[in-house]
Amino acid sequence: MSDRMNSDIRIAIVGDFEAERPSHIATDEALRHGAERAHSAVNADWISTQALEAEADRAKLEKEYDGIFCAPGGPYRSLNGALEAIRFARERGWPFLGT
């Protein structure tokens, strides 16, 4: 494994978190499990799709995160915000996972 695998990973989870939604709970658990397996720590924050509609808010992604995970279990409150996050990652060659 590379040295990068042993450092903290910061993930923006794009979605509108609902604590009662099993897929959202499983998302957090899966990220923690993967990080443990890679001997790393994951710092993941749920970012609401509405918060990603503005370009200034999307620019914060670049400063604060290493990759984007578009969460399962929609519908999204703002489909446009979710699509803008996808575009953001695609245009920058950023690590992105969507379900």
Image (tube, helix red, strand yellow):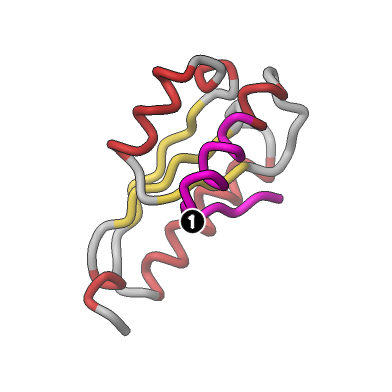
Residue 46 at x, y percent in the picture: 48, 33
Left or right: 51 in relation to 39: right
User: Considering only vertical position in the picture, is 64 above or below 16?
Assistant: below
Residue extending furthest bottom? 1
**Is 29 included in the stretch rendered in magenta?**
no
Residue at the image point whose x is 61% and y is 40% from the top: 86
Residue 82 at x, y percent in the picture: 64, 30
Say which residue label 1 marks: 95
State the residue in front, 98 or 29. Answer: 98
Can residue 82 be seen by looking at this rendering?
yes
Image-quadrant location for residue 53: top right
For label 1, count other residues whose C-alpha is less than 10 Å away and answer few (under 14), some (14-19) or many (20+).
few
Residue at the image point whose x is 73% and y is 38% from the top: 73
Residue at the image point whose x is 47% and y is 52% from the top: 94
Residue 44 at x, y percent in the picture: 40, 44
State the residue in front, 74 or 2. Answer: 2
Residue at the image point whose x is 43% and y is 58% from the top: 32
Can residue 18 be seen by looking at this rendering?
no
Q: Which residues are magenta?
A: 84-99
Residue extending furthest right? 75
Residue type at mark 1: give it: Pro
**Is 85 included in the stretch rendered in magenta?**
yes
Image-quadrant location for residue 38: bottom left
Q: Quadrant of the N terminus?
A: bottom left
Label 1: which secondary element:
loop
Left or right: 19 in relation to 58: right
Residue 3 at x, y percent in the picture: 22, 76
User: Considering only vertical position in the picture, is 46 above or below 90?
Assistant: above
